[in-house]
Amino acid sequence: MPPRKNRHAKAGKSKKKTLLWTLAIFLLLIIGGLVYYFTSIYNQLDNMHKTGEDSPWANVPTASAEAVKPPEWEGTEPVNILLMGVDARGVKKGEVPRSDTMLVASLDPVKKKFYVFSILRDTYVDIPDHGTQRINAAITYGPNTAMQTVSDLLGIPIQYYVYTDFQGFMKLVDAVGGVDYEVEKDMRYTTKADGPEFDIDLKKGFQHLDGKMALQYVRFRHDATSDFTRTERQRGFLKAVADKVISTTSIIKLPTILGEVTPYIDTNLDISDMWKLGAVGYDSSMGGSAQIPPMNLIREKTLKDGSQVIGFSSERALKQFVEDTLTAPEPSPTPGAEASPGSSPSASPGTK
């Protein structure tokens, strides 16, 4: 029979070995989980850039001819991204619908601020090589034409684009678990043309919006102020969605979220730029937002066919308005002032 001391030594070594194996397995599980997590994110981000027949512009001749690699972003200068949302209902395969929503997100990595401009879709502009049309037609000629058109309008370079449709928006909202938001008034609209699944029926008040309800909220424009207040609502709601996406819970679910929305998104952002933009955006706050054209510059026009479009009084003044919005100092907070639910720091239409 071995001495008691040797038995205790062997038992101690056995426990120590078991503990080491447990720690090793635990570390392997953590490392494996992290590898799977980041690999999933990488693959989903990589799949956002569509090529060949998967591209929304596969059948647009000018899109492939004009496709150019965006300038390399060093992560120190402002970057501007055109966000385009379309209503693809009833569109034949290979056709590109006009954009229902056009926004520009401008991110300043030095100031750690981002700005959002929503462009009224009936704004009448010159589309390079395609004459003067409503700006929502620019997308039908390919993403580079859309980016150049918006760049010419705002007076700032547009380096990247992100394209999605209604389904992608609804999937995103549902993937983050919905958004708690203040609906500022009753919203109701029905039409036989689109079918009951696209009716709008929202009640006033603070409530939880799922993807379908959120789409109703950002689409609603059937009131006296039409597209003017709709663009303001879109800016405010997109900020609420962004806040939800970067929340701790959603970061953990990021691979699942990306898996839901990736099939509905096309972009020219590469993975390196996505990582850099994501890192800067996560650490940035809202600097301001505005409608384009601003209200004080709008001049409504009637075309020869009798249709109404939106013009503006001065191209130079519009570009100056954009520059002033991007360079304006932060307003001092009012003591005791609190934002109401569903509100955002966005400016009212036409103001900074």
Image (cartoon, rainbow, N blue to C red):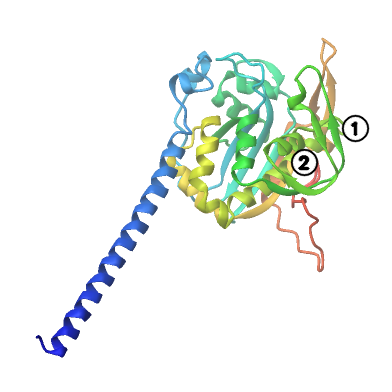
Q: Position of residue 183 (x, y in %)?
A: 81, 45
Residue at 76% in and 37% down: 217
Query: Which percent across, then down, holds residue 249?
Result: 57, 55
Say which quarter of the image contains residue 349: top right
> Which picture quadrant has residue 122?
top right
- Disc number at residue 232? 2
In the picture as drawn, the residue positioned furthest to the left comes out as: 1
The foreground one among 74 and 271 is 271
Front residue of 4 and 338? 4
Dot 2: within a 10 Å radius of its alpha carbon, few (fewer than 14), some, or many (20 or more) residues? many
**Residue 89 shows up from this direction:** yes
Residue lying at the far top of the rendered structure: 305
In this picture, residue 283 sits left or right of residue 69: right
Q: Is residue 159 visible?
A: no
Figure check: 60 above or below 260: above
Give the labeled residue for mark 1.
Answer: 224
Q: What element carries label 2?
A: helix
Distance between mark 2 and mark 1 Cα atoms? 14 Å
Residue 319 vertical position relative to residue 23 in the rendered view, above or below: above
Give, as a three-letter code, the residue at label 1: Ala
Residue shown at the point (83%, 15%) measured from the top left? 307
Label 1: which secondary element: loop
Specify which label sits upstream in the sequence, 2 or 1. 1
Q: What residue type is labelled 2?
A: Glu
